[in-house]
Amino acid sequence: MFVKPANWNAMSRAERRAARMNSWVDAKDKRFATPEAAANYRRRAQRLDDLISLKKPDRVPCLPWVAGFIATYAGITPHDVMYDYEKLKAAYWKYVEDFQPEYNIFSGSFNPGPVFDRLDYKVYSWPGHGVAKDRPFQTVEKEFMEVADYDDFINDPEAYYLRTYMPRAFGALAPLGMLPPVYATMELPFVPAFFVPLGLPEMQQAFQAMLDAGKEALRWATAMAEIDAPLFEVRGMPALPGGFTKAPFDILGDTLRSTMGIMMDKFRRPNKVLAAVERITPTAIRMGVQVATVADSPFVFIPMHKGADGYLSDKDFKTFYWPSFKATLLGLVDEGLIPYNFVEGSYNERLDVITDPDIPPGSIYWTFDKTNLKEVKKRFAGWAAFGAGLPAPLMYTGTPAQVEAWIRDAIDTLAQDGGVAIGTGVVLDHATPENIRAMFETTDRCGNYGSTAAHV
């Protein structure tokens, strides 16, 4: 866990960033199996510090997001890795042993199925529960937040989430709607009345479901630690990301109002949408700060969804999406953190907006999917680092020679002065082993700034 210095409130953005990054890179309180592992870790972590800071690192980092491929490559299904943690560990270790990645990147795809079963989670379908066992999880498009709920959400988002949204989203937690405001406990005569609902059988069943889910989540977290610890201690692999949050418009639109709901709302009740995303912005910042601080990592992962070209007009992006997202980014930067923006879809129409002069140079990392990378380079040079995302179809249907050619071109045309990593445009569920190997080996061979390998 990152411990803030005593003078934290007096520190500048740059000083806070340096404190968090130095703690992560140095890893002074962490244990390594060998001096070589420690050296590997610090070299790789320093590479990302240099990348984000727009310096020229020792080499081009390879930062792919790989998920379902890890299961299928091991001969098992996504259902197996969600329900059998020993199979998950074996599959992940096979991936690491065979492809030798330098960074341990958690995609979020290998979550514990029994937790969702016990809570009767309704917002997603997952392997063996709504989709086939060999398919990845899928979002259920449903308005779990109703139109009439806007005022309650705006007045108190967290109370609304606990007492209204969670009872709808988790079948086992329906009784949470009976919980009174916690402020009822501030006076002695009112304390017993607060606890009366907790004595009801249905409420106790809801809490039992949470306890059961908590025990299972702890089993899963222990299994994940048994994967991560050797990767860190023995192989010196930095873990990414540290924290997690979302753009306020995506918080509202993804799993509360749904895609259809939020797109209609911006026409029918625009002021409610604006008030809601503004209200949720401090929570988005706080969520990213809290998790990254516990992880002692400066990186906050942000998957970006409904701001992509085709979802919103340029005017609507500037009105509904960007202002609260910009405030979230600046809030994280103010806390010394590095937003790790995973830009899904195309952002060709957004580049002039997101290269906002209010965002300090060298403070944010963006990784792109279908955006024109040469246009990104023109605008981002001297402003922000970015990841060149290999197209998902290429990784599945292309050849190793085509993957190699794509990476060599990206390194030659985008990465020669630093500030660029090779990554994936999406989280890979489908790819061929030969193309995964070509991705790592080509980046390793051609991305060394200290040699002429990139031009041979």
Image (cartoon, grey):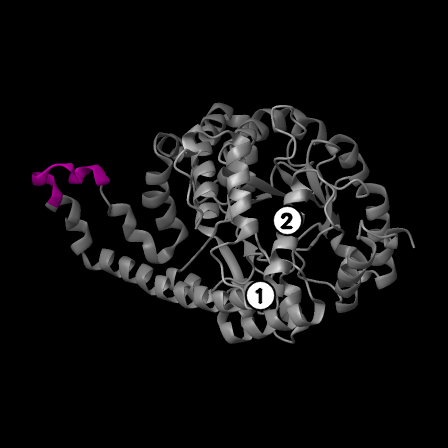
205 to 332, vertically: above or below: below
Q: Amino acid at mark 2?
A: Gln
- Which residue is most to the front? 35
> Residue shown at 65%/35% (left/top)?
362
Q: CA distance from mark 1 to mark 2?
A: 17 Å
Looking at the image, can residue 265 be seen?
Answer: no
Is residue 361 in the magenta section?
Answer: no
2 to 270, vertically: above or below: below
39 to 339, vertically: above or below: below
299 to 270, vertically: above or below: below
Q: Residue 373 lies in what quarter of the image?
A: top right
Is residue 188 in the magenta section?
Answer: yes
> Residue shown at 49%/69% (left/top)?
226
In the image, which residues are magenta? 181-191
- Check residue 68 in the rendering and tell me which mark sits there, or answer none: none
Provide residue 356's location: percent of width, then percent of height: 65, 26
Provide residue 238's location: percent of width, then percent of height: 59, 56
